Amino acid sequence: MLSKNLHKNTDRCSGCTLTGALSVTTGVTDAVTIVHGPAGCAHHNLSLFLSISKTAKNSRNPVILSTRLKETDIIFGGENALKETISHALIYKPSIIFILSTCIVGITGDDVEGTCAQLKGVKIVPIPGEGFLGGGFREGFISALTKLSDVQNSFQGKIKSGVNIIGERNLESSAEFQYIEVERLLNSLNLTVRTRFIRNIKAASIDLIPDASLNVLRDPSLVKIGEYLKQRYGTPYYSSFPEGFAETKRFISEIAGILDMDPTDALNYETLIQEAIKKEFFDLKGLRISRKNLHLELLTSNLMDELYADLNIQVTEEGIPFRFVDTPPVGSNGVRYILTKIRKSQIAGL
């Protein structure tokens, strides 16, 4: 077996367009997602979500249904199969139903939007999920976020307050840890999170999107959705969660600047936290860790540069075995987390 195909080397933010869209729609807890296509497309993704839920210790399993298209549906059209599956989805009493089109539907040309428009009684949102023309996970992810941002219709120029978190990586095992740290940093500026778009929220929370003072994007690849929301609702955005000490302070300072706030107290407090972390892990100074089993994003991150500058921790071909296959952790407590993992690896290697 080639090592690049091993499960531990699989990037949770890669794959087909359908998977990317599903990672968004399944974040709405009172929704049903219908995969319009052959049963295998839904089965593959449902298996993936169940596996990741166990890794992330998330007991919630999303409702994913399939239209289970057969040969006759592909030849004569799958609109009737879609209508039947939507009728079945109503048994779950969803607040919203998402219809994700698969590659085969994109090829056969089913009129998904027209079919959905004929049905009344529940909000139905069609989302293109076919990637046969070159789309991948990221395209499906952004497409779903864009479609869902148009679902609400309550924006009337209200007074804006709070912060939206945009585009969390729902398939990351550390997603909740990353959010808690960002929320802590926002709270240090007396800012609250208005809605998480989209992670573990009710469909009604989507209506809150236009009312925030700021959108914070998970990473720079989401600038497209940040610009879309800015143009649509006039909401400015910050382009990424922070990684490492310096970026964390920059995050606080620049968000305060966007919202015309004084960051002095928050920055002073963060400095105390960072100095305490350096002191706590001073015993690791000069340590060498192996580059094997390290996620590429971690290897190339500013965080690793800072660990070298502050504690002379170096990544080399030969060093203590250190298995870390997730993306770089966020904020000052993310640095503490990675140092704790390094220390455990050091102790295990003694």
Image (spheres, helix red, strand yellow):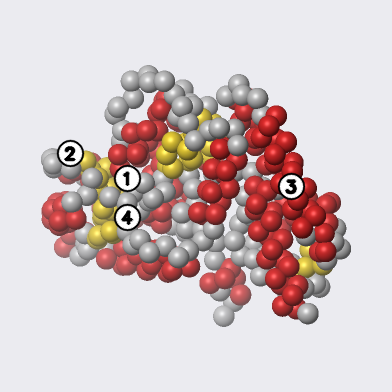
Q: CA distance from mark 1 to mark 2?
A: 23 Å
Residue found 40% across the figure and 28% down from its top:
210
| Numbered disc 4: secondary structure | loop
Q: CA distance from mark 4 to mark 3?
A: 47 Å
Tell me the amino acid under the disc marked 2. Answer: Ala
Front one among 248 and 5: 248
Residue found 55% across the figure and 32% down from its top:
190
Tell me the amino acid under the disc marked 3. Answer: Gln
The image quadrant where one finds the N terminus is bottom right
Tell me the amino acid under the disc marked 4. Answer: Thr
| Numbered disc 2: secondary structure | helix
* Residue holding disc 4: 102
Which of the two labelled residues, at mark 2 and mark 3, occupies the earlier sequence position?
2
| Numbered disc 3: secondary structure | helix
Q: CA distance from mark 4 to mark 2?
A: 19 Å
Closer to the eye: label 2 or 3? 3
Closer to the eye: label 1 or 2? 1
Which of the two labelled residues, at mark 1 and mark 3, occupies the earlier sequence position?
1
Measured as percent of width and height from the top left, residue 341 is found at 68, 66
Residue found 80% across the figure and 72% down from its top:
319
Tell me the amino acid under the disc marked 1. Answer: Lys
Instruction: Choose top left, top right, bottom left or bottom right for residue 208.
Output: top left
* Residue holding disc 3: 274
Which of the two labelled residues, at mark 1 and mark 2, occupies the earlier sequence position?
2
* Residue holding disc 1: 202
Which of the two labelled residues, at mark 4 and mark 3, occupies the earlier sequence position?
4
Tally of numbered discs: 4
